[in-house]
Amino acid sequence: DSGVTQTPKHLITATGQRVTLRCSPRSGDLSVYWYQQSLDQGLQFLIQYYNGEERAKGNILERFSAQQFPDLHSELNLSSLELGDSALYFCASSVARLAVGELFFGEGSRLTVL
Amino acid sequence: EDKVVQSPLSLVVHEGDTVTLNCSYEVTNFRSLLWYKQEKKAPTFLFMLTSSGIEKKSGRLSSILDKKELFSILNITATQTGDSAIYLCAVEEGSQGNLIFGKGTKLSVKP
C-alpha cells in the first residue's frame, strides 16, 4: 500500500460525458502528479500540482483540467469524453517540489468510455 | 523531443534464468533515472540512479547507469515467477520536473 488513494477504481461512461477522478496523496506529500496509461502510449505525464499550485504541465488535453485543494487532495476532470480517453489514470505523490525523486502511485482509476 | 526507449518490449524466460532489461534515453535536462515494477496496477519503485557506473542492488535485482552512452540496464538473477511484471524505466527531466516513462518491458517468468 503506497498510501495514495484514488477513487473511483472503475468508471464506465458514454462519449460526451464528464467525469471527475479523485486522489488523496500520502500523508505529508505536497506534490501530486496525474498520469494516463494506455496500451499503446505507456505512462504519459498530464499535470503536476505542488501545495495547491500548478507546477508543471505535460500532454494534457484542453478538455481535461485538474486542481489541488487546501487539504492537498486533487481532482482530475475529464470532459467531452471520447473513446480514446479510455485508459488507466494514475495519481502519484511525492514530498518534493522541484526534484521528482521517488513517486508513490495510487492503484489507478480505470476509465472506459463507450 | 525527450524520449525513453525500453527493450525488449516483452520477454519470456524460465525460473532461474538471468535477464537484462535495457533503457536508453534522450532527455535534454537529465536529472535521474528510475526503475519501477508494475504488477497488477500501481507501479512500485525499485531504484533511482543519478551517477554513472555505480551499481544499485536490492536482492536479486541490480541496475547501473551510463550517462555517457545514455542508457541503463536492470538485471534480475535467478528469476522467479513473482518477478513477472512490467518493468518501467523513467527519466526525471530537470526543467519541468516530471518523469518521462518508457513503454515498459513485460517480463513473464514460466515455472
Image: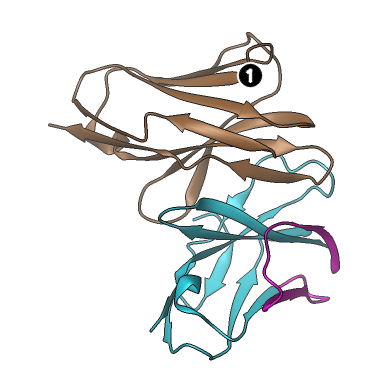
Chain colours: A cyan, B brown
Residue on which the image places disc 1: B70
Whether residue A57 appears in magenta in the rendering, the answer is yes
Question: In the rendered view, would you say B43 is above or below B46?
Answer: below
User: Where residue B103 appears, x then y in whole percent?
Assistant: 47, 43
| Circle 1 chain | B
Q: Secondary structure at mark 1?
A: loop
Q: Which residues are magenta?
A: A52-73
Q: State whether residue A30 is above or below residue B54.
A: below
For the point 63% across and 8% down, the residue is: B53
- Front-most of A28 and A96? A96
Identify which residue is drawn at 57% across, 12% down: B55
Q: Residues within 10 Å of mark 1 (few under 14, many from 20)?
A: some
Report if residue B57 is visible in the image.
no
Relative depth, front residue between A82 and B62: A82
Residue A77 included in the magenta stretch of the image: no
- Give the amino acid at mark 1: Leu
Furthest residue toward left: B111
- Picture coordinates of residue A6 (x, y %)? 55, 70
B82 with respect to A50 (left or right): left
Asked if residue B47 can be seen in this view, the reply is yes
Image spot of residue B81 (x, y percent): 22, 35
Instruction: Classify residue B79 as left or right of residue B41.
Output: left
Q: Between residues B108 and B47, which one lies in front from this camera angle?
A: B108
Whether B79 is drawn above or below A47: the answer is above
Left/right placement of residue A5 relative to residue B96 reads left
Q: Residue at x 68, y 38 (%)?
A: B2
> Which residue in the rendered view is the most extreme toward the front?
B1
Q: Quadrant of the C terminus of chain A?
A: bottom left
